[in-house]
């Protein structure tokens, strides 16, 4: 069994690994796991620190909230120490501004890698950047007190941490627009009904339920899960005939691998 000593622990993000399961924990419950550029960099580093043996990543937050979103300090004239303020970013060239936002997004994109399945264990508030972090994961297990909301539009900005694509994929364009434009709360029953949540469980069952789900995901051969995830993740961007062809190519690889004929 792999040691549970932290592989990575800084700026509100802790990574531990036990066998094929990695757990990424947001560790600032006093601020409801509010997010900052430093936290986004720490998330990116956690992704780069994953051992190759990891197949499932569990993302969770300490305390009563998964993540209440962007730290309000970001909206002050001073911003965060050592970080560009929103005004500083706005004064940058188009290329520099694009690169800065792309760097922030890296903390979210690695959770969609085909070689892992990511699970968000979500309790309490998942607001703005917190909602987008939950959406960055493949699966979401939530508690009855969960409150998802996309508040960026009300602040005069847009959701830019990779959340718009999965949100539309899960609930459709019209509902996604309504959720983002109004900033309203989506609670557990609606989340489960619309596909935002795979499972709703009592708070005292959250950790055990996520552990059971991870075990079920690990029961299938790794390469079969990787191929299946890639097929499903790309399906929306393919025509029916293109998807059929992708299925054939994927199955051919699997059969050759099982027969010991893979390159």
Image: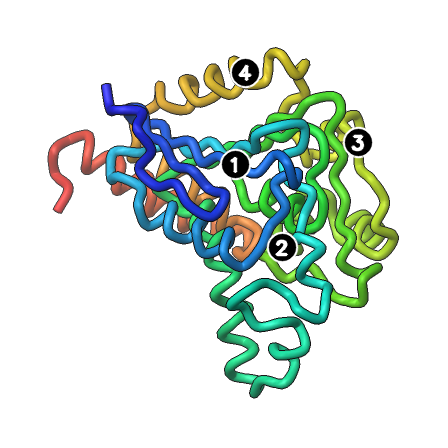
Check residue 172 in the rendering and tell me which mark sits there, or answer none.
Answer: none
Question: Between marks 1 and 3, how big is the CA–CA gap?
Answer: 24 Å
Looking at the rendered structure, the secondary structure element under dot 1 is loop
Question: Between marks 3 and 4, how big is the CA–CA gap?
Answer: 19 Å
Asked if one can make out residue 242 in the rendered structure from this viewpoint, the answer is no
Q: Where residue 12 sits in the image (x, y, percent)?
A: 50, 43
Q: Where residue 173 sits in the image (x, y, percent)?
A: 76, 53
Q: Is residue 251 above or below residue 99?
A: above
Q: Is residue 196 above or below residue 158?
A: above
Residue at coordinates 55% horizontally, 46% vertically from top-left?
A: 136
Q: Please say if the residues under marks 1 and 4 sit with CB atoms less than 8 Å apart.
A: no
N-term mark: 1 or 3: 1
Q: Nearer the viewer, mark 1 or mark 3?
A: 1
Q: Is residue 177 above or below residue 170?
A: below
Question: Between marks 2 and 3, how big is the CA–CA gap?
Answer: 20 Å
N-term mark: 3 or 4: 3
Residue at the spot of label 1: 27
Check residue 187 in the rendering and tell me which mark sits there, or answer none.
Answer: 3
Asked if one can make out residue 26 in the rendered structure from this viewpoint, the answer is yes
Residue at the spot of label 4: 209
N-term mark: 2 or 3: 2
Q: Nearer the viewer, residue 138 or 93?
A: 93
Crowding near the residue tagged with mark 3, few <14, some 14–19, many ≥20 C-alpha atoms within 10 Å: many
N-term mark: 4 or 2: 2
Q: Where residue 238 sits in the image (x, y, percent)?
A: 52, 56
Residue at the spot of label 2: 165
| Quadrant of residue 67 within the rendered picture | top right
Question: Between marks 4 and 2, how big is the CA–CA gap?
Answer: 27 Å
Residue at coordinates 79% horizontally, 25% vertically from top-left?
A: 189
């Amino acid at each position: 069994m792999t040691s549970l000593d932290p592989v990575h622990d800084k700026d509100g993000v802790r990574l531990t690994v036990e066998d094929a399961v990695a757990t990424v924990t947001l560790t600032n419950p006093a601020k409801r796991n509010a997010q900052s550029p430093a936290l986004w960099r720490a998330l990116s580093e956690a992704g780069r620190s994953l051992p190759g043996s990891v197949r499932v990543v569990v993302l969770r937050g300490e305390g009563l909230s998964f993540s209440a979103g962007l730290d309000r300090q970001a909206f002050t004239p001073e911003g965060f120490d050592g970080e560009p303020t929103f005004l500083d970013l706005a004064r940058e060239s188009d290329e520099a501004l694009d690169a800065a936002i792309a760097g922030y997004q890296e903390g979210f994109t690695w959770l969609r890698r085909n070689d892992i399945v990511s699970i968000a264990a979500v309790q309490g508030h998942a607001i703005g950047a917190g909602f987008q972090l939950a959406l960055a994961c493949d699966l979401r297990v939530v508690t009855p007190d969960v409150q998802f909301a996309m508040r960026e539009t009300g602040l005069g900005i847009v959701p830019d941490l990779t959340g718009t694509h999965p949100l539309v994929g899960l609930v459709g364009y019209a509902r996604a627009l309504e959720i983002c434009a109004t900033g309203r709360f989506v609670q557990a029953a609606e989340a489960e009904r619309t596909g935002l949540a795979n499972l709703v469980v009592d708070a005292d069952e959250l950790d055990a339920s996520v552990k059971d789900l991870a075990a079920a995901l690990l029961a299938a051969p790794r390469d079969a899960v990787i191929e299946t995830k890639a097929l499903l993740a790309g399906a929306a961007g393919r025509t029916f005939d293109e998807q059929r062809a992708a299925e054939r190519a994927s199955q051919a690889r699997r059969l050759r691998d099982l027969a010991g004929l893979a390159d």
